[in-house]
Amino acid sequence: MSWTDERVERLTKLWADGLSASQIAAQLGGVSRNAVIGKVHRLNLPGRAKSGGQASVRTKRTTAAPRAPTYANRAATQATRTINRTSGGAGAALKQDLNVVAAEELDTRPVDDVVVPISRRLTLAELSERTCKWPIGDPLQEGFHFCGNDSGEASPYCGYHAKLAFQPASERRRAR
C-alpha cells in the first residue's frame, strides 16, 4: 500500500475529526494502526485533543535534559532559600547586605589523571583465572580480544576495568 495524495488527505481529515489511529486504519483499509501513527508523525499533524478540549502540538526538544544539581549547587540553593525565608522574600534579600559563604566545591580528579592500561590482546583460549576478561571490540569482527592484564582474586577484571564495571552505590544514587 502506498500513501497517495487522496489517502493522505483523507487521513488528515479523519485525524482532525478526532478518530483514533485504529479507526482511521479501518476506514482507509489495507493499512495498520502503526502505519497511520507513523504517517501522522511524518506529516507533523497536531496531537490528539486532551480532555480539556485543547489540541497539543508535540515539538522535539533541542536542548539536553537538565542535569541534577551538584552538592555545591544544592547547598547554595538551600542557603538562598534560608536567607529568603528569614529576610522576608527575594526582594528583601536583594536590598540587604548579606555575607553568605558559598558552599565548598567538591574535589574532582582531572581527566588527564586517568591511566588506561595497555591491553595484552588475549583470545578466549588464552584467558586464565588471573587475567582481565574485559572484552574489547566487536565479537563478530576479526580484531576482537580481551584486556588480559592481571586481575585480582575477587574480580574478573583488572583495576581499571573493575572501576568501569562496578560503580559504588553512593555514586549511582548521586547521578540521579
Image (cartoon, grey):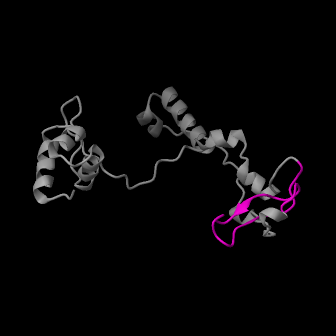
User: In this orientation, which residue lies closer to the viewer: 155 or 126?
Assistant: 126
Where is residue 51? Give x, y as percent: 23, 29
Residue 11 position (above or below residue 95)? below
Up-down: is 50 above or below 70?
above
Front in this rendered view, residue 94 or 60:
60
Q: Is residue 141 left or right of residue 50?
A: right
User: To which quarter of the image does residue 176 belong?
Assistant: top right
Q: Position of residue 9 (x, y in %)?
A: 11, 53
Instruction: List x then y, in percent, for residue 154.
Output: 86, 46
Q: Where is residue 85 in the image (x, y as percent from the top left)?
A: 49, 27
- Residue 99 appears in view: no
Q: Is residue 137 magenta?
A: yes
Report the side of 124 relative to 66 (left or right).
right
Q: Residue 152: tell me if it is visible.
A: yes
What segment carries the magenta color?
127-153
- Residue beneath the point at 80% across and 67% down: 122
Q: Residue at x 54, y 43 (%)?
A: 68
Considering the whole magenta stretch, tell me its main secondary structure.
Answer: loop
| Magenta span includes 110 | no
Say which residue appears at 71% left-offset and 46% top-offset.
167
Q: Which residue is drawn at 37% across and 52% down?
A: 61
**Residue farthest along the bottom direction in this orientation:** 142
